Amino acid sequence: MIDSPYQPLDGEQPSMPWLWLGTWSMGGEGFGFCDARESQKLLESAVEKGVRHFDTAGFYAHGKSEQLLANVMRQQRRQLFIASKGGLIWQGRNVHHRASAAALRDELQRSLERLRTDYLDLYQLHWPDPNVALEESLEALQLLQQEGLIRYWGVCNLSADQLRTHIPVGAYIPHQVHHNPIHRNDEVLQVGIQHKRCFNCCYSPLEQGLLADGVGARGLNSLGKRDVRRSNSYFCSERVRAWLGEYREIIEASPIDSVTAALLWSVTAADVQAVVVGPKKLHQLEQMLAHVQWVNCAEGQLSIKTELTVADAGRWWQCLESGADRSVS
Ligand SMILES: NC(=O)c1ccc[n+]([C@@H]2O[C@H](COP(=O)([O-])OP(=O)(O)OC[C@H]3O[C@@H](n4cnc5c(N)ncnc54)[C@H](OP(=O)(O)O)[C@@H]3O)[C@@H](O)[C@H]2O)c1
């Protein structure tokens, strides 16, 4: 299995340690219509089907994503691994960095209250704060860990240089990295894994829906005025649109769907140890879990079962690999 110390406190080793369920879009803000009862069912169904790792943030949907998780955690807190983040806050409609020691402590307290728990399994710095020394943010997280409020601390969105400078060799700190066929971050992943600095979790494997087949896949014109994806430059790029056309043609002639293909690419990408995916609807969770049957997890390596690659001659794989060449225009 994946070589990871990041597991729930009680219970058996989860069957899908590489799959972390993200709660941003199901919180009900910024990703179009979302039904709170469906989000609740989605989370309950995920637990029922064996998902144990959940990722959230105080910033997501003004705390609503954390509140949703609180309801599923009630019965089985110690069987679940709950990761949240601090360092970004809302002020009116604007987002600000707030990652001083005091702000991170304050945000953690709010997250614990919303999640109705007395500890988090993992608390992550959401983004480095340009106005606060990274050392201060990281030391603050370590202090919160020593005080027992969090089991582990982690980071997100660090550059390769920041990793080299601030994350010691052998530390094996969870790092969330934006990585998918359109937006690659190979160097960051590689530096993270070299000498076990980081445990690499890649997020937005479907590029916020662009690589899937829901509303987001239809592009900019399908998004509402307040959809956060309006500010995602890939949704406006002609070159990405042209590539997506080719990709979908290839997928139509393949034995798998676009979500499964993109997830398989991310899960088995070099230097990736976990993937954080964010379904918004119950049927999307099911579609997402369909990829699990194709994943081999042995001796700390994730790979795709050979029947699939052989059956398909890898055309979709090559197309996803070439996605990295599509710069934004
Ligand atoms: N650390 C960080 O800075 C950071 C940043 C971003 C995200 N994250 C984490 O990563 C998680 C996932 O990222 P994300 O939500 O940005 O992007 P994603 O997982 O790449 O895309 C999610 C979107 O894809 C669409 N979709 C269509 N079919 C789907 C299916 N079968 N399964 C899943 N999604 C499907 C849905 O939107 P439509 O139905 O509208 O098309 C959904 O909202 C987040 O929830 C969060 O926990 C972390």
Image (cartoon, grey):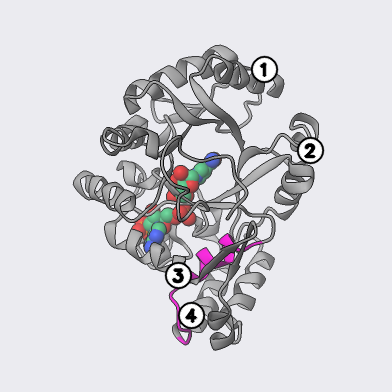
Report the residue marked by disc 3: 293
Report the residue marked by disc 1: 136
Which quarter shows the N terminus? bottom right
Does residue 306 appear to the left or right of 292 in the view shown? right
Bin the neighbour count of mark 4 within 10 Å (Cα to Cα): few under 14, some 14-19, many 20 and up. some
Kind of residue at badge 1: Glu
Which comes sooner in the sequence, label 2 or label 1? Answer: 1
Q: Quadrant of residue 176?
A: top right
Distance CA(mark 3)–CA(mark 4): 18 Å
Distance CA(mark 4)–CA(mark 2): 37 Å
Do the residues under discs 3 and 4 have CB atoms within 8 angstroms? no
Report the residue marked by disc 2: 161
The label shown at residue 251 is 4
Kind of residue at badge 2: Asp
Which mark is in front, 2 or 3? 3
For the record, the magenta segment spans 253-269
Distance CA(mark 4)–CA(mark 1): 47 Å
